[in-house]
Amino acid sequence: MSFDYLWTGFGVALQPQNLLYGLMGCFLGTIIGALPAIGPINGIALLLPIAFAAKLPPESTMILLAAVYYGAEYGGRIASILLNVPGDAGAVMTAVDGYPAARQGRAAEALTISALSSFVGGILAVVGLTFFAPALGLIAIKFGPAEYVALIVFAFATLASMVGHEPVKTLIGCTLGLLLTTVGLDPTSGAYRFTFDQPELHDGIEFIILVIGLFSISEVLLMLEHQFAGNLKPIPVGRGFPSWADIKACFWPTLRSSASGFVIGVLPGTGASVASAVAYTTEKRLLDRGTFGKGDLRGVAAPEAANNAAAGGAFVPMLTLGVPGSGTTAVMLGALMLYNITPGPQLFTERPEIAGGLIASMYVGNVLLLLLNIPLIGLFARMLQVPNIWLIPAIVVLSILGVYTAYSSVLSVLIMLGIGVVGWALRKLGFDLAPVVLGFVLGKVLETNLRNALAISGGDPSILLGSTISIVLWIAAAMIVVLPWWLARRRAQQRPLQEVQGAAALE
Amino acid sequence: MRTIAKKKARRGLLVLAATAVLATAAAAAPEKTECLVGAKPGGGFDLTCRLAANALTAAKLIDRPMAVTYMEGGVGAVAYNHVVGTRPGDAGLVTAASSGSALLLAQKKFGNHDADAVRWVASVSADYGIVAVAADSPYKTLKDLVEAFRKAPGDFPIGGGGAVGSQDWMKAAVLAKAAGIPAKTIRYVALEGGGAVQTNLQGGFIKIASGDASEMVANHKAGKIRILAVMADQRLPGDLAEVPTAREQGFDLVWPIWRGFYVGPKVSDADYAWWVETFRKLTATPEFRKEREARGLYAFDELGAAFDATVKKDVRRFRELAREAGL
């Protein structure tokens, strides 16, 4: 394959005005990502009419919008780490270790590590996009409903590593998430479930409403509680840059998570949230010696690398098949159509300045984001010193405002607040909130695809094992559940034996 | 019953009055215009609003650019309730709708309101249903496909971008009816939008795709899928000109998907007439035609009373189809 389009693209992306749009997009995206409730999709929706009205050429618009998109994946981590409030869907897992790290005074380190791993994930995804886009487009086609079922079961299996010391609570949390996905339009039969005649509930509970309620509102309630109990410990700001040993420890988790995140991002229907969940839980399974969940920086690096790689991966089906890989790329496809450009297989040959400009701008954009983010880390980390009297109202206002702007409905705000109170109660009872969110994210995809697979086969479940991809994923899922348990048992059995042999060797 | 009849008569008079006003002079333009999208950005409603907003400005029919706002929920249900309940008299507000809205009204999925709850202004474009197969499928004509489908319905999972009861499902159901297969027994696969329908068709997971022309035309042109028939009353212009209609192939399947607008129920006759007149002028301009073609959409201009009749006819037709299919 020829890379002429890419050289054309760099020519386009490095033009001064396009560099400027890229920088603007990166900056706006970081802010949009950092603010809870406003995700990249809202940011793009706001910018698109402005770009169109300003008569920007299509390649400039795409560069601007793409920069907002991956900028938001960088920004999402900030509120996750500092406040335990995920800024967007992909940043939920970042909070699991990032927030404890911040409480220990390592906020700046966590922010730096996550900026670096975001950069690696982002760059590797663009490299993947450059070299393998056409081949990867084919993967998206090979995934039918049955293959998605196997993939989600695999994701659930990696979740088993989240179980930790309280498996029942993890399972309850996950089930709560699954239950919440049943609200709204039944994707197969078209019936409304648990909607109580409220049109706001017809589409189900929105992910962002769940996340904001569960995380930011419950966090605020906890903060208030500590404030009134008077047991609020001041948080040390910490020393800043992570040690070389920390960076080295994060090297392999970042690479592995970038690769898995990219592939999951390529698949339409699974996005940054699934990618970061799989990356985090896989690394926990592989590396955890009791440090994950307590501020392990590898647990920050993995999901951040994965969600940035997934954002890059989502462009593969968009550019090669004309099929959006995520909600945000769906809006970008709409944007291309406004310019009378039909995205799809011919884009690389017919409009190289757009396909190439977009891809080249992603190389440039990731470098810009890293340069933009590193100097700001000190400033972000200082947010921890904002007194609660300002911080708490600010979080509440942003949460309510964000939900109301996105859905223009008071009911949505009330649901968000209600979920917040439930989230607070769950946390008081010692539940982890991540399994709730994961159950919710995976549940929808699982239900739709399971029912579609069975619709194709006319109810015959053997379709679930009908392809090599499915079988491999099922075996991987089984292994991820059974292997650690089996290894632990073997180790326990072999230890006495080795000790005897060791003693013999010494003699 | 009598009150409904009365209401209908009154509505008819209103429409007549509106046409009368129209014939003389239309009211002044509303100060601020806004187009409400009852969904997330990027979908069909968004496209409809932007089509209007861009072309209205380009054709200089409004002085200040039209704002496009979003209110998602229930594929337009939240927006419908909002217009009827909160802003029934807002003369500057038009809301995007499609035949999908008529379908949801027919299924009583817009809350307690029916199609009479708003004032239907104009349709501005249409898309048409299509039947497609994968590029490597042995079937080259709709007739071949229907023959094979009739013999072994279990071998033909049909995919569409919506749940049972959606327009894609209904198109699949009328196709099945043409093949003599009861709609309830088809293997319908409810996928997430037209993009997923096309990847599943290329991957061989579904054998027949039920979709819309505009979303499928690019992959048809690229040779990845094959559109066997368009569900239009005559051949479509442009890239699909060589694809015969279903009717040409002996099947009476016509499925236009119109896109248009409504205003609130308490918008005055003068303002309603202004909108109708504005859309009449708009759809005649070359700027508008260019915008419409750019979006892969086809002409379907119905204004005022004619459009109102089309919407209500569709609601009845959908209700009938759903009843026949046993929903």
Image (cartoon, coloured by chain):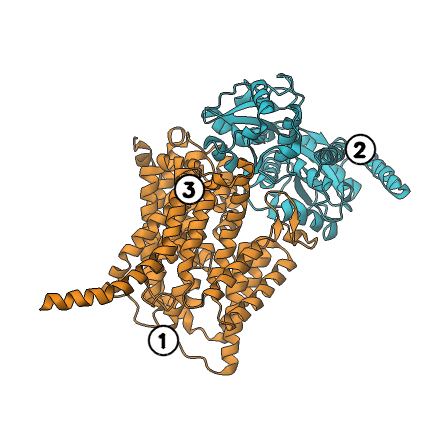
Chain colours: A orange, B cyan
Q: Is residue A352 above or below residue A503?
A: above
Farthest-out residue, right: B2
Q: Nearer the viewer, residue A502 or A169?
A: A502
**For residue A321, side relative to residue A114 (left or right):** right
Residues at marks 2 and 1 touching, judged by CB atoms closer than 8 Å = no
Q: Which mark is residue A236?
A: 1
- Percent position of residue A388, x then y: 48, 75
Q: Which mark is residue A470?
A: 3
Q: Secondary structure at mark 2?
A: helix
- At x 52% / y 44%, what residue is drawn? A450
Residue identified by numbered label 2:
B19
- At x 42% / y 36%, what residue is drawn? A142
Three-letter amino acid code at disc 1?
Answer: Pro
Label 3 marks which chain's residue? A
- At x 43% / y 46%, what residue is drawn? A151
Quarter of the picture containing the C terminus of chain A is bottom left
Label 1 marks which chain's residue? A
Three-letter amino acid code at disc 3?
Answer: Ser
Please state which of the two labelled residues, at mark 1 or mark 3, is closer to the viewer.
3
